[in-house]
Image (spheres, grey):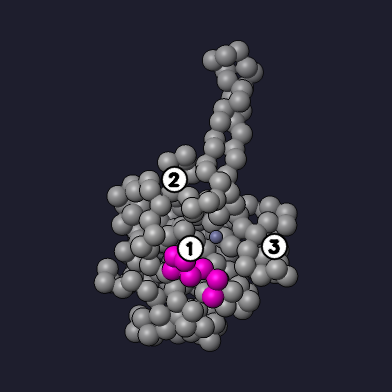
Amino acid sequence: MRIHDISLTVTPKLPTWPGDPKVDLERVEKIEDGANANVSRMSIGVHTGTHVDAPFHFLADGTSIETLPLEVLFGAVQVIELGSDVDLITAEVIQSASLIQGVTRVLFKTRNSQYWARGETEFQTGFVGISADGAEFLVKQGIQLVGIDYLSIAPYKQSKPTHQILLRAKIVVLEGVDLSQIKAGVYQLACLPLKLGGSDGAPARTVLIEQ
Ligand SMILES: [Zn+2]
Protein backbone atom coordinates (compact mmCIF):
# COMPACT_ATOMS: atom_id res chain seq x y z
CA MET A 1 0.00 0.00 0.00
CA ARG A 2 1.29 3.45 -0.95
CA ILE A 3 -0.10 6.68 0.40
CA HIS A 4 0.18 9.72 -1.87
CA ASP A 5 -0.28 13.02 -0.07
CA ILE A 6 -2.01 15.36 -2.54
CA SER A 7 -2.46 18.15 0.02
CA LEU A 8 -0.74 21.49 -0.37
CA THR A 9 1.42 22.57 2.54
CA VAL A 10 -0.14 25.58 4.24
CA THR A 11 2.48 28.29 4.56
CA PRO A 12 2.41 32.08 3.99
CA LYS A 13 3.91 31.36 0.54
CA LEU A 14 0.84 29.49 -0.62
CA PRO A 15 -1.09 31.50 -3.24
CA THR A 16 -4.53 32.54 -2.05
CA TRP A 17 -7.61 33.65 -3.94
CA PRO A 18 -7.54 37.41 -4.68
CA GLY A 19 -9.31 39.15 -1.80
CA ASP A 20 -9.29 36.09 0.49
CA PRO A 21 -7.38 36.25 3.78
CA LYS A 22 -3.65 35.57 3.57
CA VAL A 23 -2.12 32.69 5.46
CA ASP A 24 -0.86 33.82 8.84
CA LEU A 25 0.87 31.25 11.02
CA GLU A 26 2.54 32.69 14.07
CA ARG A 27 4.23 31.13 17.05
CA VAL A 28 2.88 32.96 20.08
CA GLU A 29 4.61 30.89 22.78
CA LYS A 30 8.28 30.08 22.28
CA ILE A 31 10.42 27.62 24.19
CA GLU A 32 13.52 29.68 23.36
CA ASP A 33 11.88 32.65 25.10
CA GLY A 34 11.22 30.65 28.24
CA ALA A 35 7.75 29.31 27.46
CA ASN A 36 6.78 25.84 28.61
CA ALA A 37 5.92 24.77 25.06
CA ASN A 38 5.76 26.08 21.51
CA VAL A 39 2.25 27.22 20.61
CA SER A 40 1.18 28.74 17.30
CA ARG A 41 -1.94 30.48 16.18
CA MET A 42 -3.27 30.53 12.64
CA SER A 43 -5.40 32.91 10.68
CA ILE A 44 -6.42 31.62 7.27
CA GLY A 45 -9.39 31.66 4.94
CA VAL A 46 -11.37 28.43 4.92
CA HIS A 47 -10.69 28.09 1.17
CA THR A 48 -6.94 27.93 1.73
CA GLY A 49 -4.85 25.31 -0.06
CA THR A 50 -6.41 21.89 -0.37
CA HIS A 51 -9.99 22.37 0.76
CA VAL A 52 -13.62 21.35 0.37
CA ASP A 53 -16.46 23.71 -0.52
CA ALA A 54 -19.76 23.33 1.31
CA PRO A 55 -23.04 24.08 -0.52
CA PHE A 56 -23.34 27.21 1.68
CA HIS A 57 -20.34 28.68 -0.20
CA PHE A 58 -22.52 29.53 -3.22
CA LEU A 59 -26.07 28.79 -2.04
CA ALA A 60 -27.64 31.05 0.59
CA ASP A 61 -29.70 28.13 1.93
CA GLY A 62 -26.98 25.50 1.44
CA THR A 63 -25.64 23.16 4.10
CA SER A 64 -22.34 23.84 5.87
CA ILE A 65 -19.11 21.87 5.90
CA GLU A 66 -19.54 19.79 9.08
CA THR A 67 -22.65 18.09 7.64
CA LEU A 68 -21.02 16.66 4.49
CA PRO A 69 -21.34 12.86 4.30
CA LEU A 70 -18.08 11.10 5.17
CA GLU A 71 -19.16 8.23 2.89
CA VAL A 72 -18.56 10.51 -0.08
CA LEU A 73 -15.23 11.84 1.19
CA PHE A 74 -13.75 8.37 1.43
CA GLY A 75 -13.68 5.68 -1.28
CA ALA A 76 -12.71 4.80 -4.83
CA VAL A 77 -11.76 7.74 -7.02
CA GLN A 78 -10.69 8.02 -10.64
CA VAL A 79 -7.88 10.41 -11.48
CA ILE A 80 -8.33 11.62 -15.06
CA GLU A 81 -5.37 13.25 -16.72
CA LEU A 82 -6.17 15.85 -19.36
CA GLY A 83 -3.77 17.05 -22.02
CA SER A 84 -1.87 20.29 -21.47
CA ASP A 85 -3.85 21.74 -24.41
CA VAL A 86 -7.12 21.55 -22.43
CA ASP A 87 -8.00 25.03 -21.09
CA LEU A 88 -11.60 24.38 -20.10
CA ILE A 89 -13.23 21.15 -18.90
CA THR A 90 -16.42 21.01 -20.93
CA ALA A 91 -18.98 18.21 -21.24
CA GLU A 92 -17.25 17.22 -24.48
CA VAL A 93 -13.86 17.00 -22.77
CA ILE A 94 -15.25 14.84 -19.96
CA GLN A 95 -17.11 12.65 -22.43
CA SER A 96 -13.94 11.85 -24.32
CA ALA A 97 -11.94 11.31 -21.12
CA SER A 98 -13.32 7.80 -20.54
CA LEU A 99 -14.90 7.94 -17.12
CA ILE A 100 -15.04 4.43 -15.73
CA GLN A 101 -18.60 3.10 -15.53
CA GLY A 102 -19.97 3.33 -11.99
CA VAL A 103 -17.26 5.66 -10.68
CA THR A 104 -18.74 8.34 -8.38
CA ARG A 105 -15.59 10.30 -7.46
CA VAL A 106 -13.36 11.95 -9.99
CA LEU A 107 -10.28 14.17 -9.80
CA PHE A 108 -9.08 16.11 -12.82
CA LYS A 109 -5.35 16.36 -13.30
CA THR A 110 -4.75 19.30 -15.65
CA ARG A 111 -1.87 21.53 -16.57
CA ASN A 112 -2.66 23.31 -13.26
CA SER A 113 -0.58 20.71 -11.44
CA GLN A 114 2.51 22.19 -13.09
CA TYR A 115 2.00 25.33 -10.97
CA TRP A 116 2.49 23.23 -7.83
CA ALA A 117 5.38 21.28 -9.33
CA ARG A 118 7.10 24.58 -10.14
CA GLY A 119 6.35 25.97 -6.69
CA GLU A 120 4.48 29.03 -8.00
CA THR A 121 3.71 31.40 -5.14
CA GLU A 122 1.72 33.94 -7.19
CA PHE A 123 -1.98 33.43 -7.79
CA GLN A 124 -2.59 32.24 -11.36
CA THR A 125 -5.65 33.46 -13.28
CA GLY A 126 -5.18 31.25 -16.32
CA PHE A 127 -5.99 27.99 -14.54
CA VAL A 128 -8.16 25.22 -15.99
CA GLY A 129 -11.66 24.84 -14.53
CA ILE A 130 -14.94 23.09 -15.29
CA SER A 131 -17.50 24.88 -17.48
CA ALA A 132 -21.20 25.03 -16.60
CA ASP A 133 -22.03 22.36 -19.19
CA GLY A 134 -19.21 20.22 -17.82
CA ALA A 135 -20.75 20.53 -14.35
CA GLU A 136 -24.16 19.56 -15.73
CA PHE A 137 -22.60 16.54 -17.39
CA LEU A 138 -21.11 15.40 -14.06
CA VAL A 139 -24.50 15.76 -12.38
CA LYS A 140 -26.11 13.57 -15.08
CA GLN A 141 -23.35 10.98 -14.63
CA GLY A 142 -24.24 10.63 -10.95
CA ILE A 143 -20.85 11.91 -9.76
CA GLN A 144 -20.78 12.57 -5.98
CA LEU A 145 -17.37 14.18 -5.59
CA VAL A 146 -15.25 16.15 -8.04
CA GLY A 147 -11.83 17.60 -7.48
CA ILE A 148 -9.40 19.80 -9.35
CA ASP A 149 -5.75 20.76 -9.08
CA TYR A 150 -6.18 24.50 -8.60
CA LEU A 151 -7.95 26.73 -6.09
CA SER A 152 -11.33 26.76 -7.85
CA ILE A 153 -13.40 24.16 -9.66
CA ALA A 154 -14.69 26.89 -11.99
CA PRO A 155 -12.75 29.03 -14.46
CA TYR A 156 -11.53 32.40 -13.17
CA LYS A 157 -14.22 35.12 -13.13
CA GLN A 158 -16.89 32.50 -13.88
CA SER A 159 -17.19 30.99 -10.42
CA LYS A 160 -20.92 31.02 -9.92
CA PRO A 161 -22.58 28.78 -12.55
CA THR A 162 -20.25 25.77 -12.13
CA HIS A 163 -20.25 25.95 -8.31
CA GLN A 164 -24.03 26.38 -8.10
CA ILE A 165 -24.75 23.47 -10.45
CA LEU A 166 -22.43 21.13 -8.54
CA LEU A 167 -23.37 22.24 -5.03
CA ARG A 168 -27.11 22.24 -5.75
CA ALA A 169 -26.73 18.61 -6.85
CA LYS A 170 -24.95 17.91 -3.53
CA ILE A 171 -21.72 17.04 -5.33
CA VAL A 172 -18.76 17.50 -2.98
CA VAL A 173 -16.25 19.95 -4.45
CA LEU A 174 -12.58 19.38 -3.62
CA GLU A 175 -10.17 22.12 -4.68
CA GLY A 176 -6.45 22.72 -4.57
CA VAL A 177 -5.15 19.17 -4.83
CA ASP A 178 -1.60 18.69 -6.07
CA LEU A 179 -1.69 15.92 -8.65
CA SER A 180 1.73 16.64 -10.14
CA GLN A 181 3.13 13.30 -8.89
CA ILE A 182 -0.02 11.26 -9.55
CA LYS A 183 -0.63 9.02 -12.54
CA ALA A 184 -4.09 8.55 -14.03
CA GLY A 185 -5.94 5.60 -12.53
CA VAL A 186 -8.11 4.46 -9.67
CA TYR A 187 -7.17 5.05 -6.02
CA GLN A 188 -8.83 5.15 -2.64
CA LEU A 189 -9.50 8.74 -1.64
CA ALA A 190 -9.40 9.89 1.95
CA CYS A 191 -10.36 13.53 2.38
CA LEU A 192 -11.18 14.93 5.80
CA PRO A 193 -12.18 18.60 5.93
CA LEU A 194 -11.88 20.22 9.34
CA LYS A 195 -15.17 20.04 11.23
CA LEU A 196 -15.86 23.77 11.34
CA GLY A 197 -19.38 24.50 12.51
CA GLY A 198 -21.47 26.51 10.05
CA SER A 199 -18.58 27.08 7.64
CA ASP A 200 -18.79 27.47 3.86
CA GLY A 201 -15.63 25.41 3.45
CA ALA A 202 -12.67 23.89 5.24
CA PRO A 203 -9.06 22.89 4.60
CA ALA A 204 -8.77 19.14 4.15
CA ARG A 205 -5.78 16.84 4.46
CA THR A 206 -6.26 14.65 1.42
CA VAL A 207 -4.52 11.46 0.33
CA LEU A 208 -4.77 8.88 -2.42
CA ILE A 209 -4.14 5.31 -1.39
CA GLU A 210 -2.73 2.98 -4.02
CA GLN A 211 -3.19 -0.73 -3.48
ZN1 LIG B 1 -13.43 26.78 -2.29
Q: Mark 3 points at which residue?
A: 64
Residue 88 location in percent, x, y? Answer: 37, 74
84, 187: nearer the viewer:
84
Q: Mark 1 points at which residue?
A: 152
Q: Residues within 10 Å of mark 1 (few under 14, many from 20)?
A: many
**Upstream in sequence: badge 2 or badge 1:** 2
Tell whether 196 sits left or right of 124. Answer: right
Q: How crowded is mark 3: few (under 14 residues within 10 Å), some or many (20 or more)?
A: many
Residue 87 location in percent, x, y? Answer: 33, 71
Q: In this view, does 91 lie above or below 157?
A: below
Residue 163 location in percent, x, y? Answer: 55, 71
The quarter holding residue 177 reads: bottom left
In what quadrant does ligand 1 lie? bottom right
Mark 1 vs ligand 1: CB below 8 Å? yes
Do the numbered discs 2 and 1 sit on residues whose CB atoms are within 8 Å? no
The amino acid marked with disc number 3 is: Ser
The amino acid marked with disc number 2 is: Leu
Q: Residues within 10 Å of mark 2 (few under 14, many from 20)?
A: some
175, 181: nearer the viewer:
175
Q: Residue at x 72, y 57 (%)?
A: 198
Q: Mark 2 points at which residue?
A: 14
Quadrant where the image shows the N terminus: bottom left
Q: Which residue is drawn at 54% across and 50% down?
A: 20
Please check the rendered image and state whether residue 160 is part of the magenta-colored stretch, yes or no.
yes
The amino acid marked with disc number 1 is: Ser
The local secondary structure at tag 2 comes to: loop
Q: Give the range drawn in magenta.
A: 155-161
Quadrant where the image shows the C terminus: bottom left
Alpha-carbon span between mark 2 and mark 3: 25 Å
